[in-house]
Image (cartoon, grey):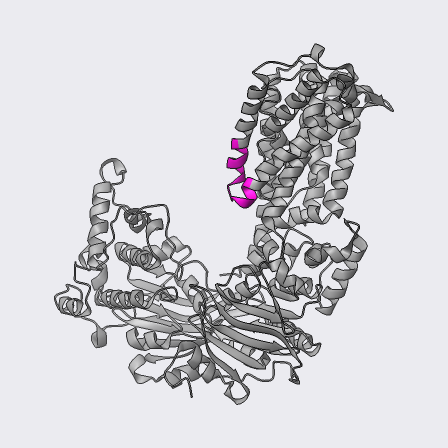
């Protein structure tokens, strides 16, 4: 390990430079950092045989990952491949159950986030973890502010250093601005400035472009180039193939928590990468279904929203499972929330059984027979302090009460009927939902909705974060619901689930419908191509 | 598991109250005679009434600091009405007091629901406004005992089966509240909305509306108590029940109502109020300065909150144990 970057005080590395690419490239030649690229020595940071298990789930199964100085390594994989878990292990949030982390070739442990940070590992998250009510300069130096006499913070030095770093990355941001007043792109710049200020050697970027506009993405690419030239090892997590192929030097593929392949990006093609990501059998584990959809139940026409989605139109028939596939941030959940009346679309209409209906609130949606099982169960699904039976009956209180009084016997009867249909095994119906496992909580939420006798059920990431056994049960149940004539919309980011369960799939990309696929078009490759916007996807 | 903790909270409070009574009885046996205990209950009745309303509000993740000012304003209005028109029947005065209190609660509720102002700010504001209105309508004057009609003053003291009407009203409201929280859809909504507002929205519940009704219930009970208070003490002035709102919140917290919303019970609230009531009545008997009462209720609040925190932390540890495999 040459240790170049470490010897460079971070503030010296990025110099003031014009924001244009050519300007930066010219400048790069007289950077003081070590030469990199092909001549780079071994990895700064390497993971070997890392294992991480959660109850019921093996999140990482002996994965390998190497990050080289001055190079961008793209970590590629479907949702659930274990990317986030790796990030959390690298940043000291999770402890691995087995395997080895090596920094400069010697084994290390990161028992805390602090330890990882001190070792020079910094992460820029999808949603930047910064402090909205502090100034830009304070954000950059939180936790490691320059000290003056008596150990007090040297404010003058702090501001000067902040300005230096910000200028160095071409960010025209006043260090005295409160962070709250900045846009998301500027916040990213601040996060990057912070990464530079702690003399980071490894920078992790977890889907940094998911929330950015096109222009902001271009600016981010320039920053990545700068970080490379400054000798940082960069782990870049993205689903977008165009950007992977544009800025990465190396790739590593994970699938289902296992290491699949690694190599140099210029030695691999789009198709190879897609195959490595999805390559596995999809059949067998999903229930066989006789697709025999009936009449049209739901018709959505021209749903638009000023910032989140545009032009969503489709129909849904009885007994049909319609999958919604897309990358994180493609606008699927946002659209579903509008359809369910939580947010208001700017245009568009809904009809049920051919009759137009107005959905202005979730209560309207439920009344018209549309129910929504949200993705974030903890926050949006179950009321954990209430017992199971009260959760199940919550939307059906009109049915379980008589003359304004709830009847506990009927509440228990309703809860018993629907939890039994879902094969929910709990000690007692008056146990609190908070005491159940994730899978069982999901069942409580689904039971709650089934008890309202809906026409259309929207399941947002129905099996996210639940163990394999519960997953199969949820899938079997979904198939049963469809067989009973319920129209099902399933939002899922898991390709096998989308392919295994859906009769038809709508792929969303950047808030629009990228494709509607059925029959022979339903292959992992077509899904990934449409979702990521890879050339030739129309084929 | 929480259910067990809650029942243990109630059991614990019952035990604490019993222990207090035993300690007092060891020196002043007269204190625990049934007649005196009944008068302690009667004395605590206003606190119980307000604490029940406050419980509904706290369950929905709000707080109502205006209850004492609401009580004082309603009390002043009915006292002035009685002074001006002694012929107005007590039934009308009761209805008026409840309606006026409910109206003030609705003002709080509307501000929280429609304007999205944090409840603590809303009720701090209305608390001051209500007190100000009392001054404006009374000109700062007192309504004294001799200005009130005999019937007006007699109502809360009238005894039925050996208990004053004030106590009977408290018992009735406790029973009605128990039924309401357990069996009315709105009572269930209070728990749901406070327990997880996001999930409540997805369930089709209107969070703001539930909070509005909680404030209305709290206001109505404050209004009712306003009349009872003024007639019992036979005086109305600007500052009656000054600072009482904090005692009300204290009763709820000691009774195990989670300040974070969604957890609590009628039984706990009543016991929390009784605990404070026993202390308040016992200290003068055992010749302890009433200032100690503040210190003791403050300590009780801290112990109660610490127990709440410990209960939830223990819950967290269990989850960690499952999630954290040996490293």
Q: Residue farthest to the left? A: A30
Q: Which one is nearer the viewer's eye here, B209 or A331? A: B209
* Left or right position of A285 against A198: right
Q: Residue A286: where, in percent of width, then height?
A: 61, 80
> Magenta part mainly helix, strand or loop?
helix
Q: Is residue A463 visible to us here?
A: no
Q: Residue farthest to the top? A: B146
Tell me which residue sits at (70%, 12%) in the image: B147
Q: Is residue B279 visible to us here?
A: yes
Q: Quadrant of residue A268?
A: bottom left
Q: Residue farthest to the right? A: B161
Q: In which quarter of the image is residue A436?
A: bottom right
Q: Is residue A204 above or below residue B78?
A: below
Magenta-drawn segment? B111-125
Residue A268, magenta (yes or no): no
Q: In which quarter of the image is the C terminus of chain A?
A: bottom left
Q: Residue B74: where, in percent of width, then height?
A: 65, 26
Residue B119, magenta (yes or no): yes
Q: Quadrant of the N terminus of chain A?
A: bottom left
Tell me which residue sits at (77%, 57%) in the image: A412
Q: Is residue B293 above or below residue A475?
A: above
Tell me which residue sits at (82%, 23%) in the image: B163
* Left or right position of B291 against A328: right
Q: Which one is nearer the viewer's eye here, A447 or B312? A: A447
Q: Residue B145: where, in percent of width, then height?
A: 70, 12
């Amino acid at each position: 390990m040459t240790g170049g970057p470490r010897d460079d005080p971070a503030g010296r590395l990025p110099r003031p430079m014009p924001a244009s690419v050519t300007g930066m490239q010219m400048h790069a030649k007289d950077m003081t950092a070590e030469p990199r690229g092909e001549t780079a020595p071994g990895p700064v940071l390497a993971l070997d045989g890392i294992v991480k298990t959660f109850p019921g789930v093996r999140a990482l199964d002996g994965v390998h990952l190497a990050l080289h100085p001055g190079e961008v390594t793209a970590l590629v994989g479907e949702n659930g491949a274990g990317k986030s878990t790796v990030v959390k292990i690298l940043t000291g949030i999770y402890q691995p159950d087995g395997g080895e982390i090596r920094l400069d070739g010697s084994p290390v442990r990161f028992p805390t986030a602090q330890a990882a940070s001190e070792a020079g590992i910094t992460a820029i998250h999808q949603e930047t973890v910064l402090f909205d009510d502090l100034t830009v300069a304070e954000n950059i130096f939180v936790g490691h502010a320059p000290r003056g006499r008596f150990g007090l913070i040297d404010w003058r030095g702090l501001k000067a250093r902040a300005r230096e770093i910000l200028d160095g990355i071409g960010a025209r941001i006043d260090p005295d601005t409160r962070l709250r007043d900045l846009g998301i792109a500027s916040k990213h710049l601040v996060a990057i400035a912070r990464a530079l200020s702690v003399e980071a050697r490894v920078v992790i970027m977890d889907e940094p472009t998911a929330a950015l506009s096109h222009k902001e993405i271009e600016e981010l690419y320039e920053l990545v180039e700068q970080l490379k030239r400054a000798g940082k090892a960069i782990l870049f997590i993205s689903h977008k193939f165009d950007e992977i192929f544009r800025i990465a030097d190396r790739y590593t593929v994970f699938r289902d928590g296992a290491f699949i392949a690694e190599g140099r990006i210029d030695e691999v093609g789009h198709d190879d990468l897609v195959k490595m990501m999805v390559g596995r059998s999809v059949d067998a584990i999903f229930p066989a279904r006789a697709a025999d959809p009936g009449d049209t139940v739901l018709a959505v026409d021209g749903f638009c929203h000023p910032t989140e989605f545009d032009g969503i139109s489709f129909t849904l028939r009885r007994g049909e499972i319609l999958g919604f596939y897309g990358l994180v941030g493609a606008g699927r959940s946002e659209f579903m929330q509008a359809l369910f009346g939580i947010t208001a679309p700017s245009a568009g209409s809904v009809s049920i059984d051919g009759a137009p209906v107005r959905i202005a609130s979730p209560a309207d949606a439920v009344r018209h027979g549309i129910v929504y099982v949200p993705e974030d169960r903890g926050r949006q699904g179950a009321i954990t302090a209430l017992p199971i039976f009260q959760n199940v009956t919550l939307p059906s209180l009109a049915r379980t009460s008589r003359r304004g009084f709830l009847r506990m016997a009927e509440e228990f009867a309703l809860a018993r009927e629907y939890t039994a249909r879902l094969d929910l095994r709990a000690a007692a119906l008056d146990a609190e939902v908070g005491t159940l496992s994730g899978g069982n909580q999901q069942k409580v939420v689904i039971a709650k909705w089934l008890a309202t006798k809906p026409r259309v059920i929207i399941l947002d990431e129905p099996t996210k974060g639940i163990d394999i056994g519960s997953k199969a049960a949820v899938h079997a149940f979904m198939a049963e619901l469809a067989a009973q004539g319920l129209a099902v919309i399933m939002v899922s980011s898991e390709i096998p689930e989308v392919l295994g369960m859906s009769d038809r799939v709508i792929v969303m990309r950047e808030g629009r419908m990228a494709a509607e696929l059925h029959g022979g078009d339903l292959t992992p490759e077509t899904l990934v191509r449409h979702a990521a916007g890879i050339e030739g996807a129309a084929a | 598991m929480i259910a067990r903790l809650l029942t243990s909270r109630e059991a614990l409070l019952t035990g604490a109250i019993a222990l207090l009574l035993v300690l007092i009885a060891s020196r002043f046996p007269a204190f625990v005679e049934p007649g005196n205990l009944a008068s302690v209950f009667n004395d605590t009745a206003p606190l119980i009434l307000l604490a029940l309303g406050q419980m509904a509000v706290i369950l929905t993740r709000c707080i109502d600091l205006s209850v004492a000012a609401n009580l004082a304003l309603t009390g002043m209005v009915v006292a002035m009405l009685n002074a001006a028109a002694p012929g107005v029947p007590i039934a009308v005065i009761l209805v008026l007091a409840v309606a006026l209190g409910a109206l003030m609660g609705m003002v709080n509720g509307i501000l929280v629901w429609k304007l999205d102002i944090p409840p603590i700010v809303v009720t701090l504001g209305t608390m001051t406004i209500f007190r100000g209105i009392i001054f404006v309508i009374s000109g700062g004057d007192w309504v004294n005992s001799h200005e009130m009609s005999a019937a007006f003053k007699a109502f809360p003291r009238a005894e039925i089966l050996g208990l004053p009407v004030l106590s009977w009203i408290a018992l009735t409201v406790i029973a009605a509240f128990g039924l309401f929280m357990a069996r009315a859809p709105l009572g269930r909504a209070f728990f749901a909305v406070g327990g997880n507002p996001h999930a409540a929205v997805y369930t089709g519940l209107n969070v703001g509306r539930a909070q509005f009704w909680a404030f209305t219930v709290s206001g109505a009970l404050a209004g009712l108590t306003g009349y009872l208070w003024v007639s019992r003490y036979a005086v109305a002035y600007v500052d009656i029940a000054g600072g009482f709102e904090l005692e009300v919140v204290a009763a709820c917290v000691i009774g195990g109502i989670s300040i974070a919303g969604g957890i609590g019970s009628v039984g706990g609230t009543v016991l929390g109020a009784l605990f404070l009531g026993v202390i308040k009545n016992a200290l003068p008997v055992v010749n302890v300065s009433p200032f100690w009462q503040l210190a003791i209720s403050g300590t009780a609040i801290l112990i109660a909150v610490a127990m709440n925190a410990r209960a939830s932390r223990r819950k967290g540890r269990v989850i960690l144990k499952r999630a954290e495999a040996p490293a």
